[in-house]
Amino acid sequence: MLSILATAAAFPALRAVSAQTPKKEKTMQYTLTPLDYGRKALEPWIDAETVGYHHDKHQAAYVANLNAALDSEPSFKYDGDVCGLISDLESVPEKIRTAVRNNGGGVWNHEFYWKGLSPKKSEPSAALENAAKKSFGGVDGLKKLMSEASVKQFGSGWAWLIVNPDGSLKIASTPNQDNPLMGAYVGACGCIPILTIDVWEHAYYLKYKNLRAEYAKNIWNLVDWKRVSERYESAVDAKKPLV
Ligand SMILES: [Fe+2]
């Protein structure tokens, strides 16, 4: 169940994503998307060993398991990206729906997570900064609430910065590999995510051990605000998520 720290309104974007998804023409084989930076690039905030295991082992396993789930149900032909797949779980045969939810979520969430980080410093756009000011009193308020959501998420899961139809921002969290794009499956409004923090232990335990709060504080040194701003613009203008 998605936990949203404020009331959320219905968002038409997910239906738009689903409607655009090509259906049942061929079977996709998903591949592990390479990182845009080296294993050491996120140090000292996230160490190279963690990045290596996280991407090359954990994320790779979600890709393999997603392909295995889809291969096990050859009657289901799917020709869409992972975003379209997890945004339209209703179309997935019940036999493999949970596997697709968990592993498709695992694939998309991780690609989105890595793309939201960068060793290069950047600043939020004026539009995003203004939205943060309206919703949280400023970017510092955004960081504080999202770090708190990261710490409060019980067990494994994700903290999210999401956009409502009116362009306002909210903080949310999901368990396991769920994300706001899954709509009704996670009890969500269908808001569009623009930033996430992976709070599975595999994301931080080698360096931070049990100190999730330290990880959720230090990760702000790595957030790619240029990318998050582009995602905000896409969510507001095109009503589409952008990895
Ligand atoms: Fe992860």
Image (spheres, rainbow, N blue to C red):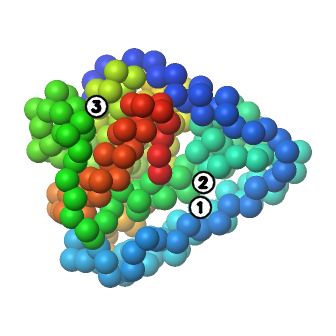
Q: How far apart are marks 2 and 1 (CA)?
A: 5 Å
Name which of mark 1 and mark 3 comes first in the sequence: 1
Q: Residue at x 70, y 46 (%)?
A: 80
Q: Can I make out residue 202 in this image? A: yes
Q: Is residue 26 left or right of residue 85?
A: right
Q: Which residue is drawn at 18% across and 46% down?
A: 143
At mark 3, the secondary structure is strand
At mark 2, the secondary structure is helix
Q: Mark 1 points at which residue?
A: 62
Q: Which residue lies furthest to the right in this view?
A: 75
Whether the residue carrying mark 3 lies under 8 Å from ligand 1 is answered with no
Horizontal and vertical percent position of residue 190: 48, 28
Tags 2 and 3 in contact by the CB under 8 Å rule? no
Q: Mark 2 points at which residue?
A: 103
Q: Residues within 10 Å of mark 1 (few under 14, many from 20)?
A: many
The kind of residue tagged 1 is: Tyr
Tags 1 and 3 in contact by the CB under 8 Å rule? no
Q: Distance between the residues labelled 1 and 3?
A: 29 Å
Name which of mark 2 and mark 1 comes first in the sequence: 1
At mark 1, the secondary structure is helix
The kind of residue tagged 3 is: Leu
The kind of residue tagged 2 is: Asn
Horizontal and vertical percent position of residue 98: 65, 44
Q: Can I make out residue 98 in this image? A: no
User: Quick one: 239 or 14, which is closer to the camera?
Assistant: 239
Q: Which residue is drawn at 37% across and 26% down?
A: 164
Horizontal and vertical percent position of residue 132: 19, 35
Q: In this view, does 39 lie to the left or right of 224?
A: right
Q: Distance between the residues labelled 2 and 3?
A: 27 Å
Q: Which residue is drawn at 25% across and 63% down?
A: 222
**Tag shown at residue 169:** 3
